[in-house]
Image (tube, rainbow, N blue to C red):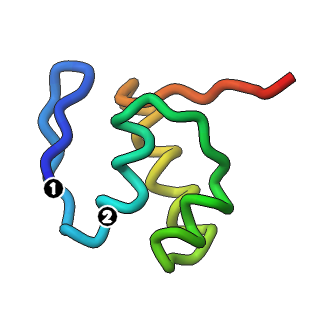
Amino acid sequence: MTLSAAGTVYEFAPEAEAVLRPLADGRTVDLATLANTAGLALEDVAALVQELVARQAAMVGSLL
């Protein structure tokens, strides 16, 4: 899967699509849901999202 964000193109294994698709579609979803959907450890999904945020390819919001 290819993700283009913040002027950078990222290449991911096809298995990452279950995590990245909701983010690319602009949906609000919690990390636990992403991890469960992808069948990955929460820590791995959190690390991926943290890296995307650090590179300004994603942003974190809060639910009120």
Residue 32 position, x and y percent, is 68, 62
Residue 61 position, x and y percent, is 66, 25
| Marks 2/1: CA–CA distance | 7 Å
The mark total stands at 2
Residue at 79%, 27% in the rendered image: 63
Q: Is residue 49 rendered to the left or right of residue 57?
A: right
Residue at 50%, 79% in the rendered image: 39
Residue at 59%, 72% in the rendered image: 36
- Residue tagged 1: 1
- Could you say whether the residue bearing mark 1 is in a helix, strand or loop? loop
Residue 15 shows which numbered tag? none
- Residue tagged 2: 16
Residue 16 position, x and y percent, is 31, 64
Query: Which residue of the protein is positioned furthest toward the right in this rendering?
Result: 64
Is 7 located above or below residue 47 in the figure? above
Tell me which amino acid carries mark 1: Met
Residue 4 position, x and y percent, is 17, 32
Residue at 28%, 72% in the rendered image: 15
In which quadrant of the rendered view does residue 18 lie? bottom left
Q: Quadrant of the N terminus?
A: bottom left
Q: Quadrant of the C terminus?
A: top right
Marks 2/1 in contact by CB < 8 Å: the verdict is yes
In which quadrant of the rendered view does residue 23 lie? top left
Near mark 1 (Cα within 10 A), the count class, few <14, some 14-19 or many ≥20, is: few
Is 54 located above or below residue 11 in the figure? above
For marks 2 and 1, the one nearer the N-term is 1
Q: Is residue 24 rendered to the left or right of residue 54?
A: left
Query: Which is nearer the eye, 15 or 53?
Result: 15
- Could you say whether the residue bearing mark 2 is in a helix, strand or loop? helix
Q: Is residue 47 rendered to the left or right of residue 42?
A: left
